[in-house]
Amino acid sequence: MQLSKVRAMEQIVASFKDGQIVAIGGQTAQYMPERLIDCLLESGAKHLTVYSIDSSDPDIGVSRLLQAGRVDRIITTHVGTNPLTNARIQDGSLKAELIPMGTFIERIRCGGMGLGGVLTKTGLGTVVEEGKQVIEVDGQKYLLETALHADVALTRCRRADPLGNLAYRGSSGHASHPVIATCADLSIVECDHFCDLGEIGPDEVKVPGMFVDMILV
Amino acid sequence: MNNRNFIAKRAAAYFKPGDVVNLGIGIPSLCGSYAAQGVLFQSENGFIGIGPTVNEGLMKSERFVNAGGVHFEPVPGSSAFDVAMSFGVIRSGRLGATVLGGLQVSAQGDLANWATPGRAFGMGGAMDLCNGAKQVIVAMELVAKDGSPKVVNRCSLPLTAIHCVDHIVTDRCVIDVTPEGLLLSEIRKGHTVEEIQAAVEPKLLVAPNLIEMEED
């Protein structure tokens, strides 16, 4: 028996609920999991918290969720490419936590890898330090940055097989996708190419299938 | 040469063959055109070996885009990876240099470049780059559009990082951050030390061998 993780759009739509934390892969409005975002919009889920490297450009990716009024809170690193996001932050309808990009991705990685947090020097002496624990190791000061775990992860990959083994291509084709794919209770991936078992060689697999729950082909 | 390209060309002169370098958006993104052969460019979204810009045609792929959203062709020897690896490269001291834009730089080499009053656009990768790169080069106009100083005694805007800047490359001069203070090391033809001093807040040291910057 083959335990394929391929799901119909309706099954994916049924996975979303109000108030969920949704981590979304992609960066600079490129190579976003747009078909999975269609599913999330279709579900009607609202009051979402989104983890995303940026808030995309208007009408693309994460911005479509923001524009539809589905997101109450976003944890991100940069909103400069999307004037709509800044307007919503300024009028108070969107809570935004801006954190450094390297710290963002490490916190996400911790959330997926069973770690409580990481130590980094990034942000020392800035507003990022406020309210955080400073830990000294071998005479060097670091900020303790805690893990971010999501309810659902939406990512995109170049190739996937029925077990959810994933392979990527390029810069925007990698970006945050392989890390975000690991950080949630429910990891849903949309793939450009769906492959047979064994077609993606073991050495080419970047994210092992055990991290993936559903595939949209 | 216009001011933006003048700044970019001078900033690129800090790169050595074999360096891996990260360029910010705006003026810094122009540095690639002036870099020595053998310099590789890194992008936050997970790439070393950013090559020429690609507009249309068979080579255009949405999977090869830099952190500024520009499509590129990879150079031979490139590598692709995820953002976690990308920031491992950045934080671990392996980047030869980063060139960033600046809103304010202080006398102590503090940098502010990610938020203005009423508009917090976010730090993106800038805080990590300032923390980890071997050389932090700020490429910016010497003064703001309204003529107010950008080289200041203390930054009033939210900081990107403290004590991080090595060189400030501007349209009129190069200022190095040294333990003794800000050192005016190069000046563009047609400008005077007195004029530069009047455009910045901190008292500048002047290099005994003050260099006149080449125009092109």
Image (cartoon, rainbow, N blue to C red):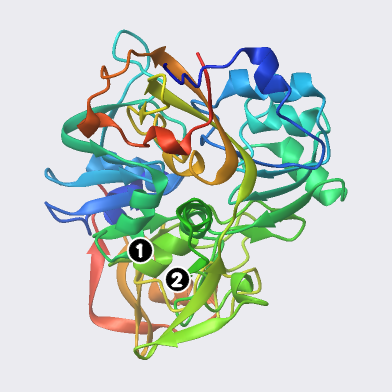
Residue A131: which quarter of the image? bottom right
Kindly identify the residue that appears in the image at 37 percent across and 91 percent down.
A139
Q: Is residue A158 above or below residue A131?
A: above
Pointer 1 with pointer 2, Cβ within 8 A = yes
Identity, as a three-letter code, of the amino acid under mark 2:
Thr
Disc 1 with disc 2 on a shared chain: no
Neighbourhood count class around disc 2 (C-alpha, 10 Å): few under 14, some 14–19, many 20 upward: many
Query: Disc 1 marks which residue?
Result: B91
Q: Which mark is residue A120?
A: 2
Neighbourhood count class around disc 1 (C-alpha, 10 Å): few under 14, some 14–19, many 20 upward: many
Kind of element beneath mark 1: helix
**Viewer-proximal residue, B184 or A26?**
A26
Quadrant containing the N terminus of chain B is top left
Query: Which residue, as the protein is rendered here, is positioned at the far top?
Result: B57
Kindly identify the residue that appears in the image at 32 percent across and 36 percent down.
A206
Q: How many marks?
A: 2
Kind of element beneath mark 2: strand
Classify residue B157 as left or right of residue A48. left
Identity, as a three-letter code, of the amino acid under mark 1:
Arg
**Viewer-proximal residue, B174 or B211?**
B174
Chain letter of disc 2 in the image: A
Residue A192: which quarter of the image? top left
